[in-house]
Image (cartoon, rainbow, N blue to C red):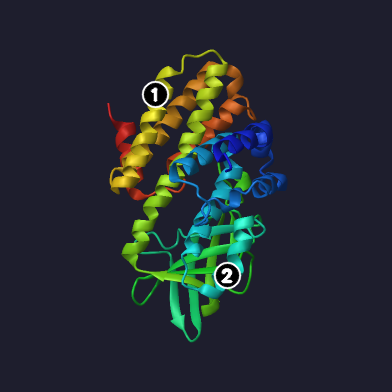
Amino acid sequence: MTDWPELAVEIAENILFPVADSVDVDGEIPASHFDALAADGFYGLTAPDSGVTPNVLVEVLETLCGGCLATTFTWMQHLGVLARLAGSENVEMKESCLPGLVAGEVRAGAAFTGAIPVPPTLWARRVDNGYVLDGVSPFVTGWGLVDVLQVSARDEFDDSVVHAILPATDGPGITAELLPLIAANGSNTVRLTFDGAEVPDASVSGIESSESFGESQLFGQWMTGCLAMGVARRCIRELEELGADVDAFEDQAWRVRLDLDAGLERSSGLSEARARASELAIRVAAALVTATGSSSIVGSNTAERLMREATFTMVAAGQPSIKTALLARLTRS
């Protein structure tokens, strides 16, 4: 049986972290990073028969986020697409696509942010033999790095959510605008605009109710909590190497992880836990900058990169409830 956390440590420490600063500066993730994850089976972690438990999954995600946030943020989009497709009723699509996705031979990204807001920014209109998409998916990660994209849009008739698997390329009715990010810029995050983009029924991977879609976002919130926790744990490690006392930070990280897991289990309190995770990342990153000293205000060093990455976790993959909870924590006396 594969020891996924141990294997993640090997990749994070030997492949990702040694070049994380240069990846940040260049804004380009080496293809070898994704190839290494594929070779060791990490693209299939959310497959039904993987045997990977949620606890193992978050340990892997936090470890890899602490190695290179840009690489992990891009790769982890694939996991959600794989999990959703595995439960699809489109048997033909599942049989043709799933093996390649599990092996990492086909790599996926997700464009679901247009379906979340109220009102949504991306609509699906039913036509003969498919749908037409109009609107915007504001943040789509991995453009030019992934092969296919799961696009989610609201049906303009009944407010259900339509999911489709499309080629991750510019095409008729689809244009991409690259977004410069303060951190994880190598993730090639874009704003996708759809103008009469046609989606045949064969490309539709699923349709679900608005309520079901909202419930599925809880798991995504829990997973993306690993962004903040991975950055925080890397900062703690760097602080320890500088000789700082990190016992209090380690205790806080342990407690936040418990809160994140409890929030998922209860389906409540998750937004507050996410807010605590990002607050912790900001505080421990600030401590690392302080302990590093004046060299941390010179660009292109680990401390200042982690400070920007901690800031990134405050709003990346966020929800209004997380924003409210985080603002409340930050403005509390």
Task: Where is residue 11? Give x, y as percent.
Answer: 64, 37
Q: CA distance from mark 2 to mark 1?
A: 45 Å
Residue in the picture at 57% in, 63% down? 149
Task: Where is residue 331? Give x, y as percent.
Answer: 31, 32
Identify the residue under disc 2: 95
- Mark 2 or 1, closer to the camera: 2
> Marks 1 and 2: in contact by CB < 8 Å?
no
| Kind of residue at disc 2 | Glu
Task: Where is residue 194? Give x, y as percent.
Answer: 53, 69
Residue in the picture at 50% in, 49% down? 51
257 left or right of 93 in image: left
Q: Nearer the viewer, residue 304 or 96?
A: 96
| Kind of residue at disc 1 | Asp
Where 70 sits versus 97, above or below?
A: above
Considering the image in quadrants, where does the N terminus appear? top right
Residue in the picture at 40% in, 29% down? 254
Res 196 seen here: no
Q: Residues within 10 Å of mark 2 (few under 14, many from 20)?
A: few
- Outermost residue on the bottom side: it is 128
